[in-house]
Amino acid sequence: MSFQEELESICQHVPGCQSVVVMNLDGIVVGRQDNAESELDIEILLVELTSSLKQALQALVSIQGGEMAEFSILFDKGSLVIRLLEDEHFVAVLLQPEALVGRGRYALRRHAQPLVKELF
């Protein structure tokens, strides 16, 4: 499966998925797939969160907590699940408020290695 097909598959298999984005920790979008219109701009949200994500990664290093695998935020207008990939990249899925976060987490975990393979 190609990189874009992996993103499409995540959107198709996660009910309530609005968008899937692969981005690096500098805020540069590598790939994106939208499934539904959203009043939230996932790219702006992720760019704003990258500094917090970097701080969380540094905090784990400083306490020898190991590597971060996943980061989730639940809010009134939806949910955001971020899964770290290799080489400072991550994949994020934006879900509608009624969507099952576990489905999004599972899809990101399942597609992480194929996405890494296509990235590098």
Image: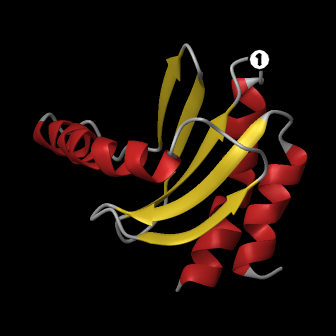
- Under circle 1, the secondary element is loop
Q: At 64% across and 53% down in the image, what residue appears?
A: 20
Circle 1 sits on which residue?
98
Q: Quadrant of residue 62?
A: top left
Residue 53 vs 103, above or below: the answer is below
Q: Which sits in the foreground, 18 or 74?
A: 18
Q: At 84% across and 60% down in the image, what residue appears?
A: 9
Q: Residues within 10 Å of mark 1 (few under 14, many from 20)?
A: few
x, y percentage for residue 56? 24, 37
* 38 lies left or right of 75: right
User: Three-letter amino acid code at disc 1?
Assistant: Glu
* 4 lies left or right of 47: right
Q: Residue furthest top?
A: 76
x, y percentage for residue 13? 88, 47
Residue 93 vs 72, above or below: the answer is below
x, y percentage for residue 28? 37, 69
